[in-house]
Structures are given as structure tokens and as C-alpha cells.
Image: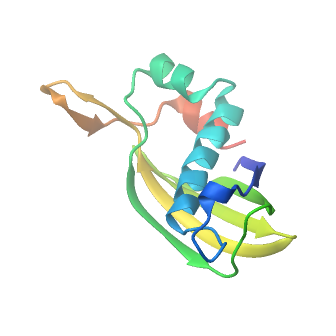
Amino acid sequence: MLVNTRSVEIEFGDCDPAGIVYYPNYFRMFDASTAHLFETALGMKKIAWIRHFGIVGIPMVDTGAKFIRPSAFGDVVSIETTITELRRSSFVVSHKLYNGGELAIEAHEVRVWAGRDPENPDRIKSRALPPEVVEALSR
């Protein structure tokens, strides 16, 4: 499967009063890393692939993380993101965050390829992953 790696500099606003990253901010970083993985795979920004495929997005239905070591203001971390499982309409994403070359966090997400429900446009409904997306992520 395709692996995308990006560097993120930890900013002051990412941190709690102890000076380490406040844990929910990691999930914001992982969300952006998933979008970057799709951008790399599909060759277009998130807003473009959402429009191109006529979906509302890729909402998360499960997530979790194992926190091994903290990161602090000024650290530059590396986030390695890949798809570990492709299903009919959902997929599992793995994130590994490295700080100073050492594994600091292992995280996962389960997301759904979702569009408007044709029977009730106020709701969303899962859709099958397009073959083009499956192929792009499987490289």
C-alpha cells in the first residue's frame, strides 16, 4: 500500500501547560495526514477529490492511539501514514509518528467513503470505494 510521510513542526498552540502536545491535537495532525495521503494518491487536494467523486467526505467511525513518548513545542515530527485495509466502503488508516527518529505514537482510524443519502439528503450514507481510489491507494 502507498505510504505518505510528512513533517510537522509542533507549535506553541499544540501544547498544554506542561509544554507537551495536548493529545487531541495529535488526532488533528492525523486527520490532515490522511488527507495528505489521499492527495498524494489521487494527485489533487481534498476539496478537489471530494467534488470529483461527489462525496461529502471520509468520516471517522473508530480511532485510537498508543502514546509512547511525548513531543514538545519546537519538535519536528514525522508522520508516516498508510492504508492497512481496504473494504467495500470503509478503510483502515495507520499512522506512526516519529520524534527524533524514535517511534512516539502508533494510531489508527477507520473511515467511511460517504455521500448524501439519496432517500434523505439530510443524512449521509456509505458508498463503495471507487476502483480508481482503490488502485491509487494500493500502489
Give x and y (percent) for residue 106.
Answer: 63, 71
Does residue 16 appear left or right of residue 80 in this picture?
Answer: left
Q: In front: 126, or 37?
A: 37
Tell me which residue sits at (72%, 58%) in the image: 10
**In the rendered view, would you say 93 is above or below 47?**
below
Give x and y (percent) for residue 48.
Answer: 55, 20
Which residue is farthest bottom? 68
Does residue 64 appear left or right of residue 10 in this picture?
Answer: left
Tell me which residue sits at (53%, 31%) in the image: 131
Give x and y (percent) for residue 119.
Answer: 12, 26
Does residue 101 appear left or right of residue 117 in this picture?
Answer: right
Screen quadrant of the C terminus: top right
Q: In front: 5, or 8?
A: 8
Tell me which residue sits at (59%, 40%) in the image: 35
Give x and y (percent) for residue 14.
Answer: 61, 59
Q: What's the image's color scheme?
A: rainbow
Q: Is residue 84 visible?
A: yes
**In the rendered view, would you say 85 is above or below 129?**
below
Tell me which residue sits at (45%, 64%) in the image: 63
Number of callouts in the render?
0
Q: Is residue 88 visible?
A: no
